[in-house]
Image (spheres, rainbow, N blue to C red):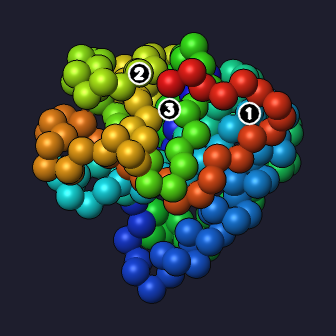
Amino acid sequence: MIYTVECSYADAQTEAEWNDFYSLQKLPALISVAGFQTSQRLKALDAGVPAAVPVYLALHTIDGLGVLTGDDYREKGGGNFARWQQHITDWHRNLYACAQVAPALQAGDWLLVSPHGPDTLQQLGLCTLALKAVALEGFPPQRWIARLPAAQRPAMAALPPDVQAYEAMTEQLRSTDIPQSVC
């Protein structure tokens, strides 16, 4: 399953410190939780991103909803955001059924996200992963994602308006020798 956490951050003075905490402390703590397979943070690209799209996206592969309700997650889940909570906006969590692990983005790759179907991404020649919401907020009910390798990146202006593009902020952390995503 793919667990997503999305948010924006409203205080420019503490945003770098918050990003360091999330990337350097929270992600490693999450990947140590039993049932977390992969974790990676992404940031929405500025050009063409609608204002309603949260800036940050954390993309995790987990074994199932029980991982998020278990003691291991409560005990080691990476601390809390109390210090930064007042500045976190547009916070959303979803759990999606998916046949594969989340794709690992390398430097220069983009993750493209479409809520309207795989056609747009497939027309770009990309292999898509279908995500169907099964728990937490459940909205959007479906998404399709695709990794766009740096070598194949089109100009941002060429992306359809319903496609959101993200770039990696961190490397993908992996808990074990799980297979790479086919896409």
Residue at the outermost front position: 151
Give, as a three-letter code, the residue at label 1. Gln
The answer to whether residue 139 is seen in the rendering is no
**Rendered-image quadrant of the N terminus:** top right
SS type, badge 1: strand
Q: Which mark is residue 94?
A: 3
* CA distance for labels 1 and 3: 16 Å
Q: Is the C-beta separation of discs 1 and 2 under 8 Å? A: no
Residue 59 position by quadrant: top right
Q: Residue at x 57, y 72 (%)?
A: 18
Give residue 45's position: percent from left, percent from top. 31, 56
Residue underneath mark 1: 37
Q: Amino acid at mark 3?
A: Asn
How many numbered marks have been drawn onto this rendered protein structure?
A: 3
**Which residue is nearer to you in this view: 3 or 88?**
3
Q: Quadrant of residue 153?
A: top left
Q: Are marks 1 and 3 in contact (CB under 8 Å)?
A: no
Give me the C-alpha separation between circle 3 and circle 2.
Answer: 22 Å
Q: Which residue is mark 2?
A: 127
